[in-house]
Image (tube, rainbow, N blue to C red):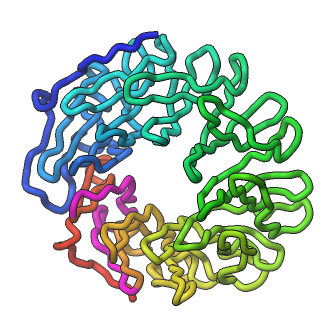
């Protein structure tokens, strides 16, 4: 296999950049007219935003925005070829990502100062290794990749060498390690083994070890949403006799933390979020339908609130923790899916009926700007899906980028100092990069 480090491009000499004072609105029409630059995978790193963006001359490449200038910094696939950089993460003060590059396929690359370098051609051919699930543990990066010999297995990079840690599913089959989490200095993850299915594993020195065959046999317990709370891991897992329920692991033993739907039926816990000393999650019971629950480490799970009383569900979604607040969307049966919040002191309350009536605004894509304000997208009959912000008391519509009922559908948010940047479309151009200043933004509409 190749282990070549090489410079692909130097900053600053490529054409196709926009340099202008920071203003609210579209930063650059990268693909003029209704064609879309499709900015996505935005990440803030070293005081700048990095993203995937397309233009007519170079295709989809890596771009950088510093608040004044948006510029392309790679041409990894020369001409109009598409490198499609994505899965950005930060390691040892460098930005890493996966991208397509001939003759390697999709592999891991490193932005090191002003150079982009191939970390390793794991696939050792034009067939991609498609690395993913990157997790930094003990100053090393752990991830899943396919070397075209052993399938998708556990690998690590220590900043110098890339090595395979284990071939958990021996042979060409894939164990698909994922859902990495650190509990008290031990790396845990899920993986599949022949005859056992997908179960919880741990890194034991330089090898991987299944902790317990929680659901004996080839089906596996299929742990989902592994989340640390205190000194325990909480997750949903499946057993034939109990269905998909909430489990915990304290580093020594497993325990069913809550059997909310008794018998073989599943409560299907999802959207696990830690706030303070408790875990919030969404689950289904015969009495309440799908509602919001909470649990403290070692204690029993409790219903937070039955927003839509009785068997019918409020179906909370898009749970987002901002300081001591939990924002989410829920449907009380009268006002549709609207913006709610939960705090320890105030419990669960509706923040605002953003789209008045029974339809609901469907708030989503939350991101916090500072200690007070959270930005998100929501829909109203008058404006469509546009950009909003809330502090839990006041909610403000900030931009009507696509006037009328269609909406610009803001998404892929990132914070750059006091600005929120995101992708959107205005009906005259395709989806492009937009930014707005928090300090100077003026509300178009306000809900209290």
Residue at image point 66% right, 68% down: 282
**Residue 407 lies in the magenta stretch:** yes
Q: From what the image shows, is residue 176 above or below residue 298? A: above
Q: Is residue 327 visible?
A: yes
373 left or right of 130? left
**Percent x, y for residue 253?**
77, 54
**Residue 356 lies in the magenta stretch:** no
Camera-side residue of 26 and 276: 276
Residue at image point 55% right, 27% down: 145
**Percent x, y for residue 121?**
44, 17
Camera-side residue of 276 and 434: 276
Q: From what the image shows, is residue 50 above or below residue 343? A: above
Camera-side residue of 406 and 89: 89
| Quarter of the picture holding the C terminus | bottom left
**Percent x, y for residue 353?**
48, 83
Q: What stretch of residues is rendered in magenta?
A: 393-417
Residue at image point 62% right, 82% down: 332
**Percent x, y for residue 114?**
19, 31
Residue at image point 40% right, 24% down: 100
């Amino acid at each position: 296999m190749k282990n070549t480090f090489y410079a692909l491009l130097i900053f600053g000499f490529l054409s196709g950049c926009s340099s202008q004072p920071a203003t609210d609105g579209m930063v650059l029409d990268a693909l003029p007219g209704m064609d879309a630059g499709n900015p996505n995978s935005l990440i803030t790193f070293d005081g700048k935003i990095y993203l995937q963006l397309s233009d007519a001359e170079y295709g989809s490449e890596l771009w950088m925005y510093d608040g004044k200038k948006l510029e392309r910094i790679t041409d990894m696939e020369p001409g109009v070829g598409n490198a499609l950089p994505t899965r950005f993460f930060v390691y040892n003060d460098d930005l890493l990502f996966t991208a397509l590059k001939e003759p390697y396929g999709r592999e891991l690359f490193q932005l090191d100062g002003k150079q982009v370098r191939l970390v390793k051609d794991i696939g050792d051919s034009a067939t991609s290794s498609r690395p993913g699930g990157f997790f930094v543990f003990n100053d090393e990066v752990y991830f899943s990749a396919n070397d075209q010999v052993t399938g998708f297995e556990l690998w690590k990079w220590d900043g110098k060498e890339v090595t395979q840690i284990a071939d958990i599913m021996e042979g060409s089959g894939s164990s698909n390690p994922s859902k990495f989490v650190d509990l008290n200095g031990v790396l845990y993850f899920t993986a599949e083994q022949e005859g056992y299915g997908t179960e919880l594993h741990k890194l034991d020195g330089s090898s991987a070890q299944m902790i317990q065959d929680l659901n004996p046999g080839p089906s596996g317990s299929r742990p989902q949403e592994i989340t640390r709370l205190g000194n325990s891991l909480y997750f949903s897992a499946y057993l034939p006799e109990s269905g998909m329920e909430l489990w915990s692991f304290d580093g020594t033993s497993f325990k069913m933390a809550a059997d909310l739907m008794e018998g073989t039926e599943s409560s299907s816990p999802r959207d696990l979020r830690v706030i303070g000393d408790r875990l919030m999650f969404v689950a289904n019971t015969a009495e309440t339908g799908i509602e919001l629950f909470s649990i403290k480490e070692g204690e029993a799970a409790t219903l937070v609130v039955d927003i839509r009383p009785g068997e019918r569900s409020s179906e909370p979604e898009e749970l987002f923790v901002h300081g001591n607040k939990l924002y989410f969307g829920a449907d009380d049966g009268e006002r549709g899916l609207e913006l709610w919040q939960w705090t320890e002191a105030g419990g669960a309350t509706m923040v605002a009926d953003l789209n008045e009536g029974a339809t609901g605004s469907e708030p989503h894509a939350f991101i916090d700007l500072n200690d007070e304000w959270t930005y998100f997208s929501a829909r109203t009959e008058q404006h469509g899906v546009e950009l909003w912000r809330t502090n839990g008391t006041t909610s403000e519509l900030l931009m009507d980028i696509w006037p009328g009922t269609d909406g610009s559908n803001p998404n892929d948010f990132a914070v750059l100092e006091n600005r929120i940047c995101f992708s959107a479309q205005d009906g005259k151009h395709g989806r492009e990069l937009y930014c707005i200043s928090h300090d100077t933004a003026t509300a178009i509409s306000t809900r209290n």
